[in-house]
Amino acid sequence: MNWDDTTDETAAERLVGPAAERLVDSVADREDQAVEAALRPKDLDEFIGQEKVREQLDLVLRAARARGATADHVLLSGAPGLGKTTLSMIIAAEMGAPIRITSGPAIQHAGDLAAILSSLQEGEVLFLDEIHRMSRPAEEMLYMAMEDFRVDVIVGKGPGATAIPLELPPFTLVGATTRAGLLPPPLRDRFGFTAHMEFYEPAELERVIHRSANLLDVEIGSEGAAEIAGRSRGTPRIANRLLRRVRDYAQVKADGIITREIAAAALKVYEVDARGLDRLDRGVLEALLKLFGGGPVGLSTLAVAVGEERETVEEVAEPFLVREGLLARTPRGRVATPAAWAHLGLTPPRQSAGGNGQQDLFGA
């Protein structure tokens, strides 16, 4: 229900083959984008989750409307699929303003940004996705536009070049980023309101799933929704994607009603286990546990054992495994946690007699 169409060029987007078709990938594919347009909430009251962000943003927008002024610039950060694009559209709707949508990678020259800014209407919302990937010249032009609502357009080249000041109507910039740390401080400081989107709790995802099921005309029980929510990695986009796949299974293999048993059977077919791990995630854990005794092992060696690229393991599989407490990154390499052994139903090898914390792979 709440998600955003990120354009961040992560390793997931560069994948080819089976790894590119992960059901638990938080980056939107074409099918997601088509469905999300119909499922997005239209106002803050309808938006589920992110309670603190909603409360704070509601105050910002209400105050701006009361003053009859344009809302402060807003920066939204967080992982893909948590609702950044949705919130930007809600901001425009709450302010009764049109919205213009673009992305950082699409703005490679200052002239590109100047063309967009000069065509904005008064009060319009400009949503800039993956703002950290904008080119440096455009970024520097944006400083003045955000603060003074003015840009300097350079006409000519060399000694004869002339800067022509161009006044802009007041507008609201909503920037979204999955990597807030890459934003330069001068840009971050120009946002009047900054919010970080957190991962969702299972109970919140259940509400998301029930709402989406109602809009998709799918009959689902509370236990079925809980089963899907528990495998959705705290991300609404993934929850909605899993819901659609379970719906397909229920229509073909059952009577169309999603129960806990139907949801579990469907997600078993799609290789998404009870904690939301898919084939790639389990492959990394199995290689780490079975081939290397739980580690430590280097990233390149682990990637070769899994049969994937180093970047795929590091950027696609590892973040969720680390967040779930199944894998740890150490200076000596990747190490499995006790939770990883328990999840795969394996017994850790006993510690070596030397007492140095190394796992004895040979039982000596």
Image (spheres, helix red, strand yellow):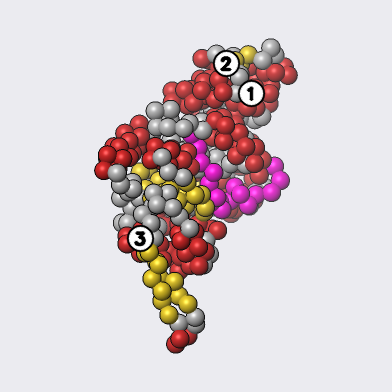
- Taking the image as shown, residue 201 lies to the left or right of residue 363, namely left
Q: Position of residue 296 (x, y in %)?
A: 50, 47
Give the camera-side residue of 161 and 28: 161
Number of marks in the rendered image? 3
Identity of the amino acid at label 3?
Answer: Phe
Spatial distance from mark 1 to mark 2, Cα to Cα? 10 Å
Spatial distance from mark 3 to mark 2, Cα to Cα? 50 Å
Q: Nearer the viewer, mark 1 or mark 2?
A: 2
Q: Residue at x 60, y 23 (%)?
A: 216
**Residue 356 colored in magenta in the image:** no
Residue 363 found in image quarter: top right
Name the residue furthest bottom: 159
Residue 220 — which label? Answer: 2
Q: Identify the residue position indicated by label 3 in the image.
A: 149
Answer with mark 1 or mark 2, whichever residue precedes in sequence: 2
Identity of the amino acid at label 1?
Answer: Val
Residue 218 visible: yes
